[in-house]
Amino acid sequence: MSDTLQTPTTCFLAAHGVAFTMHDYDYVSDPGKIGMHAAAGIGIDPEKVFKTLMVEIDKKQVVCTAIPVNLKMDLKKVATLMGGRNARMLGAEKAEALTGFQVGGISPFGARTTVPVIFDESILGLDKLYINGGGRGLVVELAPKDAISCVQATTASITVDAPHT
């Protein structure tokens, strides 16, 4: 276990017996690029670093999604997966109130309110996952199987397909 900063995320992981390592980096608030800054800041390939995005399905159900920082989410895929018609990003104020985390520091682990979690299926090909550690400038490194099991997450293709050339 890490002996560094305690956040709701690290407390949640420790309580679930999940081994993790904490990494920190200089947080830069640059909308749409925070995850890429995180990957560069810890020196890890972007496809191994996941960003956490809160999504609202049909204006009634909220889900937590996590995708590689270098990809874009396919909201239609998320809506369909959850049996809904429409999905949209949850506003920053609502996301912060629901999770207890600041935008730029939202984690699927240890949020104030428990919601379904969906990881992009690319997580299954990784040996290590790097994802927000519950604060801006904090990333936890853990085994993908532990990340999935501790929140009973679903894995599915939820990113925009690469254009065919």
Image: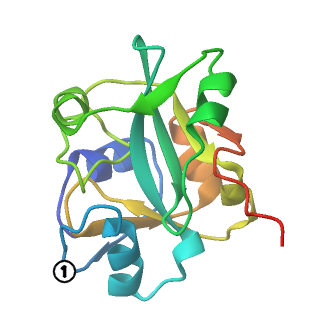
Q: Which residue does the numbered mark 1 point to in the structure image?
A: 26
Q: Quarter of the image holding residue 20?
A: bottom left
Rendered-image quadrant of the C terminus: bottom right
Q: Nearer the viewer, residue 131 or 35?
A: 35
Q: Nearer the viewer, residue 42 or 6?
A: 42
Q: Position of residue 82 (x, y in %)?
A: 62, 21
Q: In the figure, 134 relative to 150: above or below?
A: below
Q: In the figure, 108 relative to 90: above or below?
A: below
Tell me the residue at 72%/45% (across/down). 157
Instruction: Judge whether residue 1 can be spotted in this image.
Output: no
Tell me the residue at 54%/21% (across/down). 86
Q: Secondary structure at mark 1?
A: loop
Q: In the figure, 84 relative to 6: above or below?
A: above
Q: Quarter of the image holding residue 77?
A: top right
Q: Position of residue 109 (x, y in %)?
A: 38, 43
Judged left or right of residue 148, residue 89 is left
Q: Amino acid at mark 1?
A: Asp
Judged left or right of residue 146, residue 8 is left
Tell me the residue at 68%/24% (across/down). 80
Q: Residue furthest top?
A: 60
